[in-house]
Amino acid sequence: MDPQSLLCYSDFEWWIKPTGQMRVPAIIYADKQLISDMDEKVREQLINVAALPGIQRAAYAMPDAHWGYGFPIGGVAAFDPNEGGVISAGGVGFDISCGVRALQTTLTANDLEAQKEELAEALFKGVPAGVGSTGAIRLNEQEMDDMLCGGAQWAVEQGYGNPADLDRTEERGRAIGAQPECVSREAKKRQCEEMGTLGSGNHYLEVQRVAQIFDAVAAEAMGLHENDIVVSIHCGSRGLGHQVGTDYLKSMVVQGYRPIPDRELACAPIHSELGQHYLGAMRAATNCALANRQIITHLVRGAFHQILPDVKLTLLYDVSHNTCKIEKHSVDGGHRELFVHRKGATRAFGPGHPDLPTSLQAVGQPVLIGGTMGTESYILAGTKQSEKLAFSSACHGAGRAMSRTQATHRWQGRQIIEELRNRGVLIRTRSIRGVAEEAPGAYKDVNAVAAAAEQANLARRVARLVPIICVKG
Amino acid sequence: MANEANAGITVYKGSGNKPVGPPIERKMARWEHFSHGSDIGVRGIGRSVEEAFEQVAVALTAAVADVTAIEQQEKIEVHCEAPDMELLLVSWLNAIIYEMAVRKMLFGAFRIVLAGCSLTGTLAGERVDPERHRVAVEAKGATVTELKVTCDQDGQWLAQCVIDV
């Protein structure tokens, strides 16, 4: 995207003023280089989103924005149902409530070095990953509905993890208002064998080392110190969420709100039968994702304890980055309940927000930014300013710099695994081709994305993490 | 990435586990992948809309795995309907994705019969073997992004969309 085509409000805030059908401006938070590297489609999609009814303040793009489905990935848009606001399946994404959770451990990098290989094997065996993988849990119809209503709370009740985990999960691990009856039989069938599975593509399980602390106070509050070992899990709502996205995208294209500039913006008024059904199904899929990450946490703990029986793993935080949540925000001097879509964007509540656990009140919500298996990941903290800037939102990852096809032409999976091994990073995967597609070089520079998020005041950097073991989906 | 039809893929008529009759020769038909930021575009090209739909299905499988390594051990029949041909393409690809997901299978050969905007498809394949099939990534769903079903002046059909992976 040509930065010249935007109005430069500051070095990290770029505007498209409303013209034509746009009801609000579009605002991109990024530095000039990240803007230059963004696909022109981001601009086109933001302009389209800004034209949807009921949109509030602006259509936003985060520093990692790229071409998505109707809405850009890295996009944030909030709608007021009382002003005709809409909900969009594409604005949430196919992998509903895909997200990242980070676990602190009682280990330092030195403690792990001698048993790194053994731990990599235990994690690879213990957590099903990749195309066609299945989990050990089978749910009957009633249990499936219970899981879809209960999310991570249901998983903890079944013995997967501890009640304390819920304190560090958005919405205490359960999306209220889930309606399993709005989830198709096909979606439930697709989930039958997939509870506790990681998935594939950019999903991963990583053991990471805290390489750098940026904000000592926030890091202390989060229990992070240099050389600590952290575990990050990136995955979502698996087959059920994908099928809910598929089912409702089609329904919204056929029966949804008109007129829209493009089919891929398919949406439905929040105050409509279709809109309400999608909300009920989306919240059920959100609970599926939360339960899935909770079960995987249990599997990860089990794998660690096989090798290192005394280690403790506590949940630092769990964030979803494909969501639509009801939140109270300030608009035109008053507080309103808005439906905030975050597609490839992370909620980033600032210090003092009532939804944060007491232990994080002083520092703000942890924002977990996934990197690639060869580069860094980041933990950031939400800022107070982010509420006014982008409804308390920040970026979610590095974002791809090149397509999967280009990546497989450029890199060999085995070569990448060998190179990373030489750098001390162990990769475990069932898909060598998948490693090539997910080559670190195929992604944008996550350091630049995290720095831009901080410079734009969306969130501030707390810690930089580097991978030690990566189980690739 | 592009491939000629029948280069390592044989499309058979009939049903049941064994091929019936000779392979169908469709030399003009082919599939391609095209770039989309984080996901993958699939395109089928053929002398009829049926051929284009069959080829785009091969492109879908090729995004997931090595399509040439898939044996036709089992056949599955699917039905779908939509208000127009473009949405029928999305429904067709989503029907394949669904069968892949619930059966843990990969399909390497496809045959469809169209009746207006209603489709009956036969998928031939086998249970997924991650190593032998060189699997890369799961398909989550077919989207309406870059969705097109067109016929050019030479009578060549094109069917395409982006797959979320």
Image: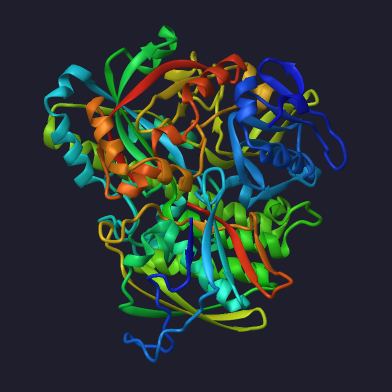
What percent of the width, then of the height, locates residue B154? Answer: 70, 73
Task: Please identify the quarter of the rendering in which residue B118 is found.
Answer: bottom right
What percent of the width, then of the height, locates residue A157? Answer: 32, 45
**Residue at 30% from the left image edge and 49% from the top image edge:** A431
**Residue at 72% from the left image edge and 48% from the top image edge:** A86
Task: State left or right for residue B153 relative to residue B164.
Answer: right
Q: Nearer the viewer, residue A180 or A318?
A: A318
Q: Nearer the viewer, residue A10 or A282?
A: A10
Task: State left or right for residue A110 relative to residue A352.
Answer: left
What percent of the width, then of the height, locates residue A462? Answer: 44, 15
Q: How is the image coloured?
A: rainbow
* Residue A221 vertical placement versus B33 (above, below): above
Task: State left or right for residue A213 relative to residue A254.
Answer: left
Outermost top residue:
A216
* Residue A27 vertical placement versus A263 (above, below): above
**Residue at 52% from the left image edge and 58% from the top image edge:** B141
Task: Please identify the quarter of the rendering in which residue A407 is found.
Answer: top left
What percent of the width, then of the height, locates residue A434? Answer: 36, 47
- Looking at the rendered image, the quarter that the N terminus of chain A falls into is top right
* Residue A163 vertical placement versus A388 (above, below): below
Task: Answer yes or no: is residue B92 visible.
Answer: yes
Q: Nearer the viewer, residue A41 or A19?
A: A41
Outermost right residue:
A20
